[in-house]
Amino acid sequence: MQLSEFLRRACGSDLWPYRGIQPVTEPTPMGHEYCGIVEEVGSAVKQVKPGQFVIGSFFASDNTCPNCRAGYQSACEHKEFVSTAQASILRVPLADGTLVPTPAVPPNELIPNLLTLSDVMGTGWFAADAANVKPGATVAVVGDGAVGLLAVLSAKQMGAGRIIAMSRNESRQKLAREFGATDIVSERGDEGVARIKDLTNGIGADSVAECVGSQESIMQAIRSTRKGGYVSYVGVPHGVALDGAELFFAHVHLHGGPAPVRRYLPRLIELVLDEKIEPGKVFDLKLSLDQVAEGYRAMDERRAIKALLQP
């Protein structure tokens, strides 16, 4: 199946290869976030039709295997990583299991919001869901990138009573508050943990979402959680090693990994179309597709939260 006339975006996880931390040995197309109009379908595709506006996950899935039926389409037994979305046309395998159409072609002003569902909003929602966010809970979010900010938005939608966003960036702090953060913590590492404990009477947060993927961020998340609390980890890990003894006595639940975006797409599409959430506010830089290098530079230098690439 092919998509044309679609939007793409530069993702924070792509900064790892951009920085050389994740080796790239040859010219490689980038991009795994997309939405757009179906141009053509293969003979095996029965549900998706040309002309539909669709949104898909960064992992193609059949949506029928045992893992998919359990809600973990990103661990589909036949999964394929969609990794060439920053192009004029995108081929999406396993289209019937991967793509979710909207009821009609949406108005232009809603498309940036819908684009976020392909990864960053779906991942933010998984961060809150995997951290077992419940109504009235105290939630902390480690990381103020697009995923962290949308984990704040997701926690708010799930009814969290208090949301602590950990951020040192003024513009990101402002957006975090707009999305529902009640407190901002600028400290990191042990100082950040101490601040969370101060805000929670020495107990720690009920739920903590780790949205970075570094050693410091995952340990900060675990140490900021109350006994019996929940930690989600959705940042792609680099150089992370957990101490078994500390983890043993931490007494926290850990859950995370690549977000099963396909599980959440129908619900998130509904929230966007009903204008109950505006996740597209994380796009603070809009560029043409041939300016993608500037998008990565701006994100790497933290001049932009997230870049939107247009045809």
Image (cartoon, grey):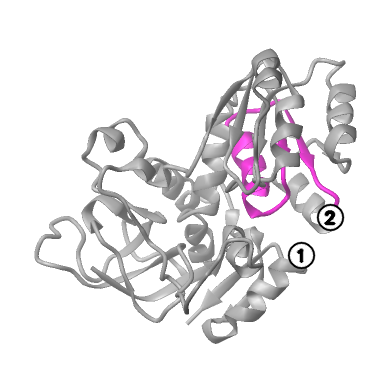
Q: Which residue is mark 2?
A: 169
Q: Is residue 235 visible?
A: yes
Rendering coords of residue 287 (x, y %)? 60, 80
Q: Is residue 157 visible?
A: no
Q: Residues within 10 Å of mark 2 (few under 14, many from 20)?
A: few
Q: Which residue is mark 1?
A: 302
225 relative position to 117: left or right: right
Which of the marked residues, 1 or 2, is nearer the chain's N terminus? 2
Mark-to-mark CA distance, 1 and 2: 9 Å
135 relative position to 33: left or right: right
Secondary-structure class at tag 1: loop
The residue that appears at 53% across and 59% down in the rendered structure is 113
Q: Report if the CB atoms under discs 1 and 2 are less than 8 Å apart.
A: yes
Quarter containing the N terminus = bottom left
Rendering coords of residue 107 (x, y %)? 45, 67
Which residue lies most toward the left here? 43
Nearer to the camera, 254 or 86:
254
Rendering coords of residue 179 (x, y %)? 69, 46
3, above or below 195, in the image: below
Number of numbered tags placed on the structure image: 2
Q: Quadrant of residue 38?
A: bottom left
Q: In the rendered structure, which amino acid carries the disc numbered 1? A: Arg
Q: Residues within 10 Å of mark 1 (few under 14, many from 20)?
A: few
Give the residues in magenta.
141-168
Q: Which mark is residue 126?
A: none
Rendering coords of residue 19 (x, y %)? 66, 67
Marks 1 and 2: which is nearer the front?
A: 1
Q: Quadrant of residue 146?
A: bottom right
Q: In the rendered structure, which amino acid carries the disc numbered 2? A: Asn
The residue that appears at 81% across and 58% down in the rendered structure is 171
Nearer to the camera, 216 or 111:
216
